[in-house]
Amino acid sequence: MRRFLRHPVRLVPFGFLVAIAIGTGVLMLPWATSEHRYTPLITALFTATSAVSVTGMAVNDTPHYWNDFGLAMITVLTQLGGLGILTGAALVTLAVSRQLGLRNRLLVQAETAEYGAGDVRWLLARIATTVVVTEALMILVISGRLWLAYGYPPGRALWSGTFHSVQAFNNGGFTLYSDGLLAFSRDPWVTLPLAFGAIIGGLGFPALFEAVRHWRRPERWAVATKLTIWGSVVLLSGGFAALLVAEWTNPRTIGTYDVPGKVLATFTQIALSRTGGFNVINTESLTEESYPLLTALMFIGGGSASTAGGIKVSTFFLLAFVIWTELRGEPDVTVGRRRVAEASQRQALTVALLSVALVVVGTVGLIVITEGVRFRDSLFEVTSAFSTTGLSVGLAPRLPEPGQYVLTILMYIGRVGPLALGSALALNTRHRLYRYPKEQPIVG
């Protein structure tokens, strides 16, 4: 075990497991629930995993089942899970001792996909500043709106604003309202801060910091940053247009709204559907055309080293460039006048295929385990769990315990990452000192 945990990459999934175990134990205690009863293991485990993996999927009515202590624990787990277990520990170490050893620097690099041990302290400072400033602004706007416009008492407004701001920035989906955020779907002072918070948190710290640093000269961005930023713009704009058209006349979602209300609700839902998890549109009443759209957006997810899940935007668009290069018969995959390394292409392909396999197995598993479940609902729920989105068509609470365990495992794998988990479990990491002769088999 000591040799297994010696490598920093292997500590990432282990750290998330420890946080889930602690969260499960605390949520099982009677003083975490409204009725002061012991919570069943599967309910506590599912909720803790959903919080740590910043999914937001629930098997009970969150605001009524958990009391203030339980909800505060969910908030802490979400913040810790979104920030990163090892990154959070390194921040505490740096704040207490003002020093960060080489081992802690390597752990932060493994979790945040950042390179350069000398830059880790500045990276941690930038991460902490970004989190605090973004969430503080969201809390200020949302709490003020709830207090001034909806008549909430100041304490309740501050608590609701804090809870939802933490959930949005970390791309979680827990909410203090049984029907989600449907009541605020046409209120820009509530929905837009949550949407932009989810977008910022879902870009990933490396891409976000580089984009801000060179915002005047985007051509200087690294390939990963270009793929993440411009890919996110394409997904947001394309998803917004497609969902707006699909739901324009649907009276059960936005069909009865005026034009500004339709635009606002659709934009917010698309921004939150890529792993945010909040629903400002009733997901159980969508048209049939909208489900494949949201499923695809959830599967793609957000940026690398972010609070978002999915296969990641950079992975999806890198594979698109690989396909385009192959169709044109060019020898190298180029993005922005830069050749993409073959190792990155293999990693992107591995992540995509592993993710597809996990979603397929999970979807079939739920259909086999649960009697009468529709394929569409099973695929939507499994994709939402794997991508750590949290959107639901109401299937999770109705699943038997084996089905809920399936979603729990998928949420954990989705947060850690299939490639990171596979690398952590691989025991043979030695480099070969020889290479076999090359052969080119027939493909297609």
Image (cartoon, grey):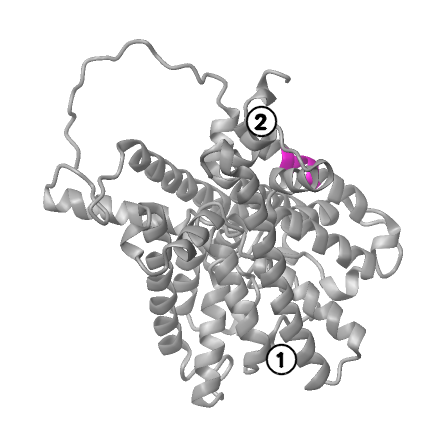
**Residue 19 included in the magenta stretch of the image:** yes
Labels 2, 1: front one: 2
Q: Identify the residue position indicated by label 2 in the image.
A: 102
Residue at left 73%, top 39%? 96
Residue 32 position within the rendered picture, expressed as x and y whole percent measured from the top left: 83, 54
- Judge from the rendering whether residue 120 lies leftward or rightward of residue 334; answer left or right: right
Residue indicated by mark 1: 183
Q: Secondary structure at mark 2?
A: helix
Q: Is residue 122 left or right of residue 292?
A: right
Any mark on residue 121, and which? none
Q: Nearer the viewer, residue 162 or 132?
A: 132
Q: Amino acid at mark 2?
A: Leu
Examine the structure image and report whether residue 83 is included in the region drawn in magenta.
no
Q: Answer with mark 2 or mark 1, whichever residue precedes in sequence.
A: 2
Question: Is residue 77 shown to the viewer in this render?
Answer: yes
Does 318 sit left or right of 368 as displayed?
A: left
Cα distance, mark 2 to mark 1?
49 Å
Front-lying residue, 358 or 401: 358
Compared to residue 148, the image places residue 377 above or below, namely above
Q: Secondary structure at mark 1?
A: helix
Q: Which residues are magenta?
A: 15-20
Where, by quadrant of the figure, is residue 10 drawn? top right
